[in-house]
Amino acid sequence: VDAVLVACSNLERPYPAIAVEVQDLLGIEGFGFDMNVACSSATFAIQTAYDMLRSGSVDCVLVVDPEICSGHLNFRDRDSHFIFGDVCTAIVLEREETCTAKGAWEILSTRLKTKFSNNIRNNFGFLNRAAPDGIGARDKLFVQEGRKVFKEVVPMVSQLILEHMADEGLDPKDLKRMWLHQANKSMNDFIGRKVLGRDPEPGEQPNILHEYANTSSAGSIIAFSQFSEDLKAGDLGLICSFGAGYSAGNVLVRKRA
């Protein structure tokens, strides 16, 4: 492993980078750094690692996604505190010629998008934590305008997926599975219908909310991990995460023989 990326919504501290500490504890040479693109952190980190591999600057990258969501929740906010869970995922990306893992997946293409919005926000920071007008303020923890998020993010993500696949010469009908951001089943159902042009069949769009809740950027990675082994060599899939920013990230993958 040449590099460690820690990508998540909820980092323990600004510096030193958590990734450098993980690197040290694992005895890894090379370098490490943190990334925070909220709920899209994992897919943004995958593209970053993918770009580094393609450039030749590294041969193998470890992406770690520790989402300690409970630390930024307002437990007086009955609209949001109960929907989150804590989890950590890890992904290894390496060059195809050195990959010996059984059941590995090839990254075909990635696509990222951001568009500024205040509808999902956490204003806590070292510059304002002690300001007299901010002590105890609601915006120093997680806040969102859920209905606005639903209305604005669904079309943004649907368009991103459709344009990405069209640019790659791929037909959405060829997708065997979509591992979408695990925040809202209704939101995913709308996106699935828009992308596929029909209601997704059971198994085409796995949901893990009942077991893990919303784990921010880790959700789509958990869904991929738990619902990918049954697919066959050559099958096409899409990992997609989206959320605060707004931000959205696609990773088109194909199962290797």
Image: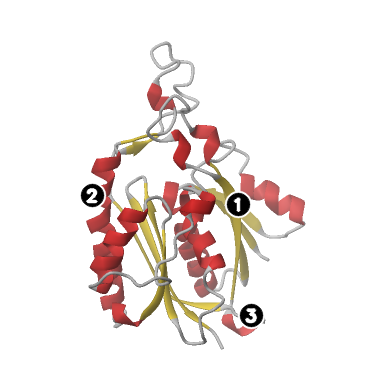
Marking on residue 99? 3
Circle 1: residue type: Cys
**Above or below, 129 relative to 167:** above
Task: Report the front residue among 218 and 4.
Answer: 218
Residue at 59 percent across and 49 percent down: it is 87
> Which mark identifies residue 88?
1
Q: Secondary structure at mark 2?
A: helix
User: What residue is at 77 percent from the left and 57 percent from the top?
Assistant: 27
Placement of 224 over or under 132, stated as above or below: below
Report which residue position mark 2 lands on: 152
Residue 146 placement (x, y as % from top left) = 30, 40
> Which of the two discs, 3 and 1, sits closer to the camera?
1
Please state which amino acid type lies under the numbered disc 3. Answer: Cys
3 and 2 marks in contact (CB < 8 Å): no
- Disc nearer the start of the sequence (3/2): 3
- Vertical comparison of 178 with 133: above or below: below
